Image (spheres, rainbow, N blue to C red):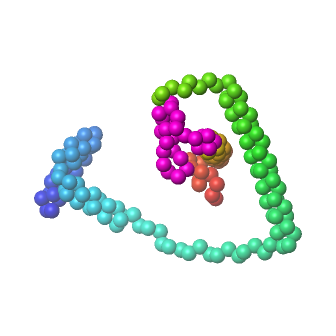
Amino acid sequence: MSSLLESTTLLIEEARSTQTPVDILRPAVASMEREQVEALAVAYLLQQVHRIKAPAFKPTPKQKPIQRTPEMIENSKRIEERRIREYADSRETFKASIDKAFAILKYEWHVEWTEELLAAKIPLPDGSTIEFGDATREQHIERARIHRRNTMLNMESAARHEKAVEAMNESGARTLRGAVQP
């Protein structure tokens, strides 16, 4: 270890004397054995532990719970019920739009029943697979239902991500947590 310390000290001295220390350090580290690199990493991290003093732990004082009046509780219930109704209504409207788009696509789309398509493997709910051409009517109905449900879930997920971007844009934060937490 002492020879590693001596060679590292010389390397640091050489790197300090140049405008681009990375050009000196990178090839030197690349030529080291794995154990030497690990020893340097541990030494560096240990130095950082001693150099950077962690702030003393201070427990945050507990906030006094808000005393909710019966009126506040009732108002919260009404707001939540309205929000649930609005969400259900918007979801039904969106589902109707998806159903309409699906009907148009199904009507206008021409499918060629090629051997490649007929031989394509499709997953079934039980985890097994079957060739597209060998699937029963019921299995195709189930696959269509799964794809329709996934369309709704994917659109909801996409909307959630776009709302997250809006929140970050409005707050100037780099992350959603930074945008929504004080």
Horizontal side of 156 relative to 32 (left or right) equals right
Magenta run includes residue 31? no
Residue 166 in view:
no
Magenta run includes residue 136? yes
Quarter occupied by residue 48:
bottom left
Horizontal side of 171 relative to 12 (left or right) equals right
The residue positioned 67% from the left and 29% from the top of the image is 105
Q: Which residues are magenta?
A: 117-141
Residue 60, given in percent of the width and then of the height, sits at 59, 73
Tell which of 60 and 69 is nearer to you.
69
Residue 63 in view:
yes
**Figure check: 145 above or below 112:** below
Quarter occupied by residue 138:
top right
Q: On the rendered image, what quadrant is the N terminus found in?
A: bottom left
Residue 128, given in percent of the width and then of the height, sits at 48, 48
Residue 109, given in percent of the width and then of the height, sits at 64, 25
The residue positioned 68% from the left and 74% from the top of the image is 63
Horizontal side of 75 relative to 43 (left or right) equals right
